[in-house]
Image: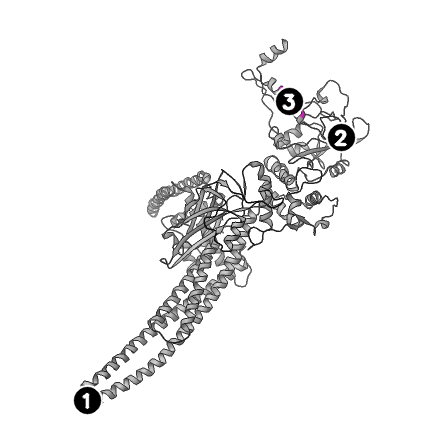
Amino acid sequence: MALWIQAQQLQGDALLQMQSLYGQHFPIEVRHYLAQWLEAQPWDAIDLENQQEEFKAKRLLDGLIQELQKKAEHQMGEDGFLLKIKLGHYATQLKSSYDPCPLELVRCVKHILYTEQRLVQEASNASSPGSGPVDGTPQKYQQINQTFEELRVMTQDTENDLRKLQHSQEYFIIQYQESLRIQAQLSSLASIPPAERVQRESGLQSRKSTLEVWLTREANTLQKYRQELAEKHQRTLALLRKQQTVIIDDELIQWKRRQQLAGNGGPSEGGLDILQAWCEKLADMIWQNRQQIRRVEHLTQQLPIPGPTEELLTELNGIVTDIISALVTSTFIIEKQPPQVLKTQTKFSATVRLLVGGKLNVHMNPPQVKATIISEQQAKALLKNENTRNDSSGEILNNNCVMEYHQTTGTLSAHFRTMSLKRIKRSDRRGAESVTEEKFTVLFESQFSVGGNELVFHVKTLSLPVVVIVHGSQDNNATATVLWDNAFSEPGRVPFVVPDKVLWPQLCEALNMKYKSEVQSDRGLSEDNLVFLAQKAFSSSSNNPEDYCNMTISWSQFNRESLPGRNFTFWQWFDGVIELMKKHLKSHWNDGAILGFLNKQQAQDMLMSKPNGTFLLRFSDSEIGGITIAWVAENPNKAGERMVWNLMPFTTKDFSIRSLADRISDLNHLLFLYPNQPKEEVFSRYCTPPNSKAVGDGYVKPEIKQVVKVEFSSPNPEPSPGNSFMEHAASPTVNQHHNFTIYPSMNDPMLDTEGEFDLEETMDMARQVEEFLRQPMETQWSGQQS
């Protein structure tokens, strides 16, 4: 069922909330007549913090205007005349409002649709008591909403009691003043004749006695009312504190944890609208109770009655101030984190938000937020409330920003769009720690008042750990530090403590999350892939996954110590695979064409049982970011013997010249992708279309092709006619001599120490061929004739 149809069925408070979403900024008639169109548009695909997305927002705005104009044109008859005028007016109004800032339209519509969906879900939950969560809404959300309803009833109850107390006290004061008037009359009787004085004195004394008895009884009643009201406020504040703990210490902390894992490629942390709605409800109820307690204090000062209530009210006032302070300081959060690998002299952005800013009217005097970069030690001192004012570890340009209130969404936030880290001051490093293991954080702080300067708050929040680099070559190791911290930090830790060792399955989860995110694939790391990685990390030969379940891996093993026999670490090798995949081989991984995580012996065992020409793709053990082709073929030097060949690894540099699909297409001895797929079925759709044979301006366009300097038997050894070759090496397959030749595995400079072909050695020859082919034809041939 369409969202708008369900939203129209809301009742009571939910209906009022839904109606309040609309106004001049977005008329409800537009929502009604364009419901289907609005719900079909990709509003969520637009990043509101990215100004480069503005053109997408402009396209949606133009589409909205066109739809409104089209709807207006189709209105017919007497009833349609007024609607036609109204819709045309709305089209003009929306264009005028949002044309200068189309991203605000996206923000507005996203907020409307999200709130409607939340209200519909809540209504569905309420109409199905005893049933499980509806539309994925957790049971905990229902409990939070039920507690809010309980708090609303309790707050209304104390409000009613307070009014009753106020009325009783007002009547008491009137009667007390009457007793004072009687006392004054009694005092004035001395001036009148005795006979008359006795008669009047008797009546006044009787009234005075009756009134004093009533006042004594009523004073006790008032004291009882005050005490009962204070005890009710005590219970309300206890429940408010409990509810705040659930929202701030559970839900908000979980959101922050999801935000941190999203830095490792985890799922998005989700929006803040539900959390903001809860925090605003908390702020509203805390403030109502605070005002009630202050009114009781005023009544107590107006009519002091000895008793324990005064001390209890003082205690309650302190409690409610603590609760509101904790709420405000905890809801000053970083909505969009600065980059965790931060390069100096490079622009970066961040967004901070105050979840209760709109409810507490902080936007009436918009506060300014300042950003400062501080070290890990300074962050520790800050959390211990030690004096760190004016301490920083670097200089950030454009580090001040005023918080803005967005009327359509009710959010108060500061968007730092053009910050830049000008310089960094590093601390003394410990032991083997490198600069890429040193953690900093961006401190955001602000100051503002609420309630007419009744309460002044100095709020601070720290970003996730940041590793500062000065050169792109440091990015790899800095990313390792960030990944380890994001994956294994505990909530509430001392900045920025992480365990030095973790269980291997924990690291597997982090690596899989990072890999899937970077390669943008649902195909993650399989159990076999993870066993291969474990063998690499622990220098083990076991193929049993259970052998690694209880093993721990240290930070040093992860990215400080080189792998045995190599000059790179485990992480550097894995990150090289990620870089290669996401830049050039994403599609092939998603297709399942790349097995990747295999060693040379495994590849040989798999291929030897397959027909000649069967090949597979595996990541190189010896080179960072390298992938090699292994294939099975006849041994040219020994009839009837077969062997597995491994081509020298390709890297990102190679694939920027010619793609993997084209290279595989060039090699005619490669026939079947393991286990038995014809290579054309897998790779042909990724191949570059053949160049035109037409000659223009005297030039022939060259074409680069992959060639291997070993001859193999294949059904179609000859290259396609009409193509120019850039040979990485002279290939026997295109020579007149058809004898088989194989080069020595260790002595030939074209082969690496593992028996793989080195294609880099012949690039000079390739460049010469390319230069030759770029010359005009007359020059080529005349040069040859001369």
Residue at 45% over, 69% down: 234
Does residue 2 appear anywhere in the picture? no
- Give the class, few, some or many, for how many residues have Cα within 10 Å of label 3's Cα (few <14, many ≥20): few
Secondary structure, magenta segment, majority class: helix
- Please determine whether, in this image, residue 718 is positioned above or below residue 6: above
Residue behind mark 1 = 196
Secondary structure at badge 3 equals: helix
- Report the disc number at residue 502: none
- Please determine whether, in this image, residue 193 is positioned above or below residue 611: below
Farthest top residue? 786
User: For the magenta stretch, what is the residue range?
Assistant: 761-768
Residue behind mark 3 = 764
* Residue 767 part of the magenta segment: yes
- Cβ–Cβ under 8 Å for marks 2 and 1: no
- Cβ–Cβ under 8 Å for marks 3 and 2: no
Q: Amino acid at mark 1?
A: Glu
Q: Position of residue 415 (x, y in %)?
A: 44, 45
Does residue 437 appear anywhere in the picture? yes
Farthest front residue? 428
- Left or right of 668, for residue 413: left
Q: Position of residue 690 (x, y in %)?
A: 60, 25
Secondary structure at badge 2 equals: strand
Separation of residues labelled 2 and 1 (CA atoms): 138 Å
Circle nearer the N terminus (1, 3): 1
Residue behind mark 2 = 633
Circle nearer the N terminus (3, 2): 2
